[in-house]
Each structure stands twice: as structure tokens, then as C-alpha cells.
Amino acid sequence: MSPAVNKFLLFFMLVAGGVLLEVIVHKLHCFLTKQHYKENHFTFRKYIFLLLFPFIATFTIAYLEGWAPLVVFVVFSFIGTLLEGLVGFSYHKVVGQRLWTYHKYSLTGYTSLLSIPLWGMAGVLFWLLARIFV
């Protein structure tokens, strides 16, 4: 396999492994404590844990590639958040209803501070995927 494919798979496996680990830890916690929280209940602890492995994956790729993945992360964080806000705003003005709503840390009601790092990590994933085919 080419190095680009290996880096993409490394990134993807770290992110997927982190999500799987979060699910296992959550189920184990509920089983051991007999406390069952709603699945969609937001806590910063769960949010930070959700971002932990994608951040590790991003910094691992940055260690292997140099500054480029971190620049991609910052640029996609900004562009993704901006586009999400613009699409949500435009749809609301044209159709008269919202496509989505954010209840935590909303920015203008159409995006959220919590989605900014997710856009950056998606950008790194797309960048790695594009490097396979280019």
C-alpha cells in the first residue's frame, strides 16, 4: 500500500477506534453503576472524550507530515463552520424553517462552537483521502 493510504487508514482507525472505545466505556459505566443516562445527554466529559482520539489522529498525522495537516485543520474549521452557518441561514430565510438547531454554545443559531473542531477533523480526513487519488 502507498504511504498516503497508510496515513488515511491510520487516521480513520484512530478516529473509529476512539468512537468505539467511547461506546464501550459508556455501556460499561452504565452496567457497573446501574445509572442509565439518556444516549443524547450532553456532557463536556463525553464531548472531550469524543474529540480525544480524532485530535490524537490529527497530531499523529501532523507528526508524520509536518505542518500541513494542522493548517488544513484550521482552514477547514473556519470554512466548515462558515458554510454551515450560511447554509442554515439561507435555508431558514428561503423556506422559513430551520434545518437544524443548536442548544449548546450556538453561534447565531445556525452553527455551534462545539462543531468547529469536528469540521477541522473532517477537513483532515478529506485532505488525506484526496492525497490517495491525486
Image (cartoon, rainbow, N blue to C red):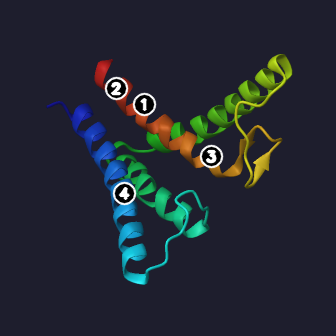
- Decide: marks 1, 4 in contact (CB < 8 A)? no
* Secondary-structure class at tag 3: helix
The residue at which mark 3 appears reads as 115
Which is nearer the eye, 36 or 109? Answer: 36
Where does the image place residue 52, in percent across and percent down from the top left? Answer: 45, 60
Which is nearer the eye, 45 or 56? Answer: 45
The residue at which mark 1 appears reads as 127
User: What residue appears at the point 26 percent right and 32 percent down from the top-left corner?
Assistant: 4
Where does the image place residue 74, in percent across and percent down from the top left? Answer: 59, 42
The residue at which mark 2 appears reads as 131
Task: Choose mark 2 or mark 3, whichever is in front.
Answer: 3
Res. 18 mark: 4
Label 1 or label 3, whichever comes before in sequence order: 3
User: What residue appears at the point 22 percent right and 38 percent down from the top-left corner?
Assistant: 6
The number of callouts visible is 4
Label 2: few (<14), some (14–19) or many (≥20) C-alpha neighbours in 10 Å: few
Relative horizontal placement of residue 22, taking residue 48 as reference (left or right): left
Where does the image place residue 122, in percent across and percent down from the top left? Answer: 49, 38
Relative horizontal placement of residue 43, taking residue 19 as reference (left or right): right
Task: Choose mark 1 or mark 4, whichever is in front.
Answer: 4
* CA distance for labels 1 and 4: 20 Å
